[in-house]
């Protein structure tokens, strides 16, 4: 199991994850949305079940490894409040286990017959008891400034921001199926991909080893369907959502180290993986029937520019094995700036803004990393923005091998916009065309 603990080690974490899944997805069929869904189900089906609570290894044991505080290994970190607590196992008064797919929607009875979704740790996370109760079994949905705030704490270099909706807080209103729970920005992608896993993992029938019946779990935007599965009994079909919101959250909050840690731990014990953490680009195919869109590949590695601007360039590097792309936005001019000039967007003199993020098909949402120090003629060390993404984001997208768009939202200077880009030279176009198939 791989458990890197700093953002500086992000690429190492992804390499570790990719090694763990070597050959795991060899039988995937991406010809259609249904073919991809069916082939993924066959791969992740029939996992090893651990008891919910037991004197032997149970979900408490695994989750306290999966949700370990990366800054304090003796503690756990909770999904909604981002709070850190000493590991106390079951029966404590601080944290419990959150079913991101509420068990009341399809599988509430964890009785004598093994109930696989009830104990499936790909959708179980440690949570503050109060926040778990406040969320209850409300569907995931975007809320509003009028909703009740459930704030986060600052831990692991994120969370804790205040100042109104949405900030770094969770937000909620209503009750049961009519309610809403908006997960905070740092973990909303985690819950989205957890529920997408549940939708594909559970498609009815029986467990291939134990013979236990399993429900067909389906993500939807229809609250009436969700409510129909809240019967207090195990159901053949269970609904949860809201799917459209989860798709949005999947894009807004890409896979990060904390999600990778949870995933790798659970995969080690259960023996199955969440394909939407390993391959976020498959979400569009399975849930939106977008399977043949242009995919980023190494043929995009190049210098790019907007010919209508003077002195704006972009250098793009795609890491296809890792599923990440990096972008350097630089400005240049034949006139050097004055000595001691500070780097600002649009200044001459080879000023740089860098960003990195995960690839999702033909698109990547990247955190901007502004740096200072590290001058070529001084021994000063480079200082990076903390936390990651605090300065804003860039979104890079392509429709083909020759043109793309860079969209930017730079919070520190309150500047947003988009730049259409094309290659400076066409040397890699042929390679890109070959790799896109």
Image (tube, rainbow, N blue to C red):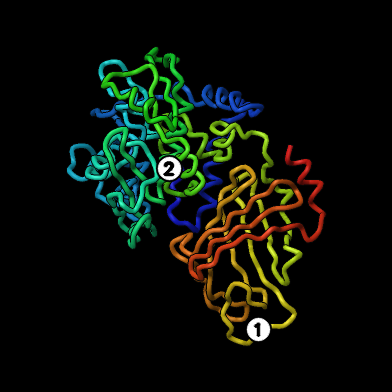
User: Could you tell me if residue 137 is visible in this image?
Assistant: yes
Residue 160 tag number = none
CA separation in Å, label 1 and label 2: 44 Å
Q: Which residue: 62% across, 29% down?
A: 26
Looking at the rendered structure, which numbered label has been put on residue 337?
1
Question: Picture quarter containing residue 114?
Answer: top left
The spot of residue 17 in percent (x, y) is 52, 42
Whether residue 110 is visible here, answered yes or no, is: no
Dot 1 or dot 2: first in sequence order is 2
Residue 258 image position (x, y, % from top left): 42, 48
Residue found at the very far top of the displayed protein? 211
Q: Crowding at label 1, few (<14), some or many (≥20) Cα neighbours within 10 Å?
A: some
Residue 391 horizontal/vertical position (percent): 49, 65
Q: Which residue is mark 2?
A: 190
Q: Residue at x 30, y 31 (%)?
A: 57
State the SS at label 2: helix
Vertical position of residue 366 compared to residue 436: above or below: below
In the image, 375 versus 226, the foreground residue is 226
Q: Residues within 10 Å of mark 2 (few under 14, many from 20)?
A: many
Q: Residue at x 45, y 51 (%)?
A: 4
Against 341, residue 101 (above or below) is above
Question: Going 59% across and 67% down the picture, which residue do you hit?
Answer: 353
CB atoms at circles 1 and 2 under 8 Å apart? no
Q: Secondary structure at mark 1?
A: loop
Q: Is residue 115 above or below residue 392?
A: above
Q: Quadrant of residue 280?
A: top right
Residue 111, horizontal then vertical, whole percent = 25, 19
Q: Is residue 429 left or right of residue 72?
A: right
Q: Is 102 situated left or right of 259 in this image?
A: left
Quarter that holds the C terminus: top right
């Amino acid at each position: 199991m791989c458990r890197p603990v700093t953002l500086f080690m992000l690429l190492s974490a992804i390499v570790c994850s990719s090694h763990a899944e070597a050959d795991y997805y060899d039988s995937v069929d991406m010809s259609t949305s249904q073919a991809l869904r069916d082939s993924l189900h066959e791969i992740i089906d029939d996992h090893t079940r651990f008891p919910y609570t037991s004197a032997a290894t149970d979900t408490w044991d695994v989750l306290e490894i999966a949700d370990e505080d990366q800054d304090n290994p003796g503690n756990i970190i909770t999904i909604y409040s981002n709070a850190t607590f000493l590991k106390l196992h079951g029966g404590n008064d601080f944290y419990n286990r959150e079913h991101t797919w509420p068990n009341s929607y399809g599988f509430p009875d964890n009785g004598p017959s093994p109930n696989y979704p009830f104990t499936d740790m790909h959708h179980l996370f440690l949570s503050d008891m109060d926040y778990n109760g406040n969320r209850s079994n409300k569907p995931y949905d975007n809320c509003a400034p009028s909703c009740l705030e459930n704030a986060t704490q600052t831990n692991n270099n994120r969370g804790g921001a205040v100042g109104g909706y949405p900030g770094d807080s969770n937000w909620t209103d209503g009750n049961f199926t009519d309610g809403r729970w908006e997960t905070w920005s740092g973990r909303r992608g985690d819950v989205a991909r957890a529920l997408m896993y549940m939708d594909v993992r559970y498609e009815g029938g029986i467990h291939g080893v134990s013979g236990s019946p399993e429900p067909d779990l389906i993500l939807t935007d229809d609250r009436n369907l969700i409510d129909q599965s809240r019967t207090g009994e195990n159901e053949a079909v269970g609904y949860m959502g809201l799917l459209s919101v989860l798709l949005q959250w999947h894009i807004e909050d890409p896979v990060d180290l904390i999600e990778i840690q949870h995933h790798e731990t659970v995969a080690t014990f259960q023996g199955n993986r969440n394909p939407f953490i390993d391959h976020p680009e498959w979400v569009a195919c399975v849930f939106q029937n977008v399977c043949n869109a242009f995919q980023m590949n190494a043929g995009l590695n190049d210098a790019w520019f907007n010919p209508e601007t003077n002195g704006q360039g972009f250098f793009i590097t795609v890491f296809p094995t890792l599923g990440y792309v990096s972008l350097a936005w630089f400005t240049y001019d034949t006139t050097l700036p004055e000595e001691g000039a500070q780097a600002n967007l649009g200044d001459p003199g080879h000023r740089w803004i860098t960003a990195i993020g995960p690839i999702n098909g033909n698109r990547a949402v990247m955190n901007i990393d502004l740096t200072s120090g590290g001058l070529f003629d001084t021994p000063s060390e480079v200082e990076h923005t903390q936390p990651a993404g605090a300065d804003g984001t860039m979104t890079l997208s392509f429709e083909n091998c020759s043109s793309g768009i860079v969209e930017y939202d730079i919070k520190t200077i309150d500047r947003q916009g988009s730049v259409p880009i094309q290659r400076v030279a066409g040397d890699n176009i042929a390679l890109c065309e070959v790799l896109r198939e």
